[in-house]
Amino acid sequence: MSLGVGACGSAQQAGDSAETKSSAIASTQAVASSASSEDGENKAGKGEDTASSTGKVASPDDVVPEAKGMKIGATYYTLQTEFCMRMDNAAKKWAKNNGVNYKSYDGNNDAATQLDQVETMIADGVDAIILNPQDADACSACVNAAVKAGIPIVGVNTMVNNDKLTGYCGSQDVSAGEEIMKYMIQYMNKDAFNIVVIEGPMGQSAQLQRIEGINNVLRDYPKIQILAQNTANWSRSEAMTLMETWITTHGDKIDAVVAENDEMALGAREAIEAAGMDIPCIGIDGITDAVSAVGNGKMVASDFQNAEGQISGALETAVKAVKGEKFEKEEWIPFEMITPKNYKDYQNRY
């Protein structure tokens, strides 16, 4: 997939090339909230045709008595980033608090590996599976495998294009893209400047939806030019290398960096400082280093998403599905913008 790869381009070009796949994800969201799988319905429970974004956010400290003795497996697209490690650590805490046998797997950014892991969990006799998919389309096979085995499979954080998914807990990534782009425009205090955009793994729902959100805002600001955009796969080191290349190519024409996560924003910042430059950077997640960077002025802001709330919500949905109880098919946890004014509130979140 070539979305976002290359040098100079407009926001419209990137948005058009992503349209088909991101539309499929949006369709999956709509269908998932109204569909309940008839296959294995007694085991998978019944999802309500509602979505929650304002109710109580789940926590690893929650006590869920009916979870005791369950066996739950989870495959994460990676366990090499702070955000995903936060989810896994929170899941372990939740499992310990609730007497659950929990085992997690690192998908190593590979959909085929995640399918193998799902099949391993099925063979191990898990009661439920948590899926944090690497690719919105390719990981559909994970859902099919679980459904065929009659095992509830709940998505978390990133989405998959399969309406048989038992349930989902995450945050609205389109809104995150919109929020960071709007904040950067507010920070720059002008409507004509040049940006570079650093994206997540191509084809992952977060990448598709965050760039969609960024482009939604840029359509109203035709004088903001994207000088370059490319993926750095959520990696700080890859983003640093990418930014070094862009500095060589574009130099002081770059006015701002918009990154789809904090790791990449921080990697770009390292390259900027090494070049003796000062270019504002913004990211998403609210990881530890990003909170510090917002506090000391190395990042202008970070859009916090609640890793603990997302995974705890997914686990609680899985328990309800196993028990045949009613549950919300989709749970949405709002993003929260971390700024120089409120960054101290996030210093001890993890």
Image (cartoon, rainbow, N blue to C red):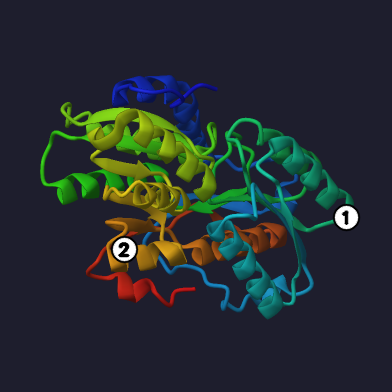
Q: Amino acid at mark 1?
A: Asp
**Disc number at residue 124?**
1
Q: Based on the displayed image, in which of its 4 quarters is residue 304 positioned?
A: bottom left
Which mark's residue is nearer the viewer, 1 or 2?
2
- Looking at the rendered image, the quarter that the N terminus falls into is top right
Q: Secondary structure at mark 2?
A: helix
Q: Is residue 93 above or below residue 49?
A: below
Q: Is residue 319 above or below residue 273?
A: below
**Dot 2, how many residues are within 10 Å of its Cα: few (below 14), some (14-19), or many (20+)?**
many
Q: Can residue 238 be seen in this snapshot?
A: yes
- Please state the horizontal and vertical placement of residue 69, each as a whole percent of the image: 79, 72
Q: Amino acid at mark 2?
A: Val
Q: Mark 2 sits on what residue? A: 294
**Residue sitting nearer the eye, 102 or 29:** 102
- Please state the horizontal and vertical placement of residue 256, each as a whole percent of the image: 26, 42
* In the displayed structure image, the side of residue 28 where residue 99 appears, left or right: right
- Counting residues from the start of the chain, the first of labels 1 and 2 encountered is 1
Q: Based on the displayed image, in which of its 4 quarters is residue 225 positioned?
A: top left
**Residue sitting nearer the eye, 274 or 57:** 274
Q: Is residue 227 above or below residue 268?
A: above
Residue extending farthest to the right is 123
Q: Based on the displayed image, in which of its 4 quarters is residue 128 positioned?
A: bottom right
Total marks placed = 2
Residue at coordinates 54% horizontally, 41% vertically from top-left?
A: 233
Residue at coordinates 39% horizontally, 23% vertically from top-left?
A: 7
Distance, label 1 to label 2, CA atoms, is: 44 Å
